[in-house]
Image: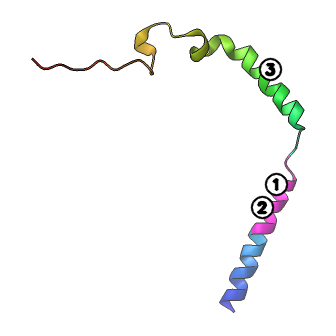
Amino acid sequence: MDIIASNLQQQRAITEQLRREAAIQRITVSQAVADIVKYVTEHETEDCLLVGFSSQKVNPFREKSSCSIL
C-alpha cells in the first residue's frame, strides 16, 4: 500500500510540474534574440570586457604579482 501511495504522490508532483511549465508565457526565438541584442547594445558602455577597466586594481583578470624572497 505504501508503494501505491508513494507512486501516486510522485505522479501528482510530476503533473503539477507539467502544469507549471505549460503555463509559462513563451515567445519566439527571433523575439528573444532581438531582446538580447537590444539589452547588450544598451549596456555595452558598462561592460568592462569591451571598454576596459578604469584602473588595474579593479581588473579581476590582471596578472597576479609574484612574490620574490631575497
Q: How many marks?
A: 3
Q: CA distance from mark 2 to mark 3?
A: 32 Å
Residue 2: quarter of image: bottom right
Q: Quadrant of the C terminus?
A: top left
| For residue 56, side relative to residue 11 (left or right) | left
Q: Residue at x 57, y 15 (%)?
A: 48
Q: Which residue is mark 1?
A: 21
User: Dot 3: what SS?
Assistant: helix
Pointers 2 and 3 in contact (C-beta within 8 Å)? no
- Taking the magenta stretch, the answer to whether it contains residue 25 is no
Amino acid identity at mark 3: Lys
Q: CA distance from mark 2 to mark 1?
A: 6 Å
Chain part drawn in magenta: 14-24
Residue located farthest toward the bottom when viewing the structure as drawn: 1
Local packing at callout 1 (Cα closer than 10 Å; few below 14, some 14-19, many 20+) is few
The image quadrant that residue 51 belongs to is top right
Give the farthest residue toward the top: 54
Residue position for label 2: 17
Kindly indicate whether the residue at mark 1 contacts the one at mark 2 (C-beta within 8 angstroms): yes
Q: Which mark is residue 38?
A: 3
Numbered mark located on residue 49 in the image: none
In the displayed structure, 52 sits above or below 25; it is above
> Residue 63, image x and y in percent?
37, 19
Residue 29 in percent (x, y) is at 86, 36
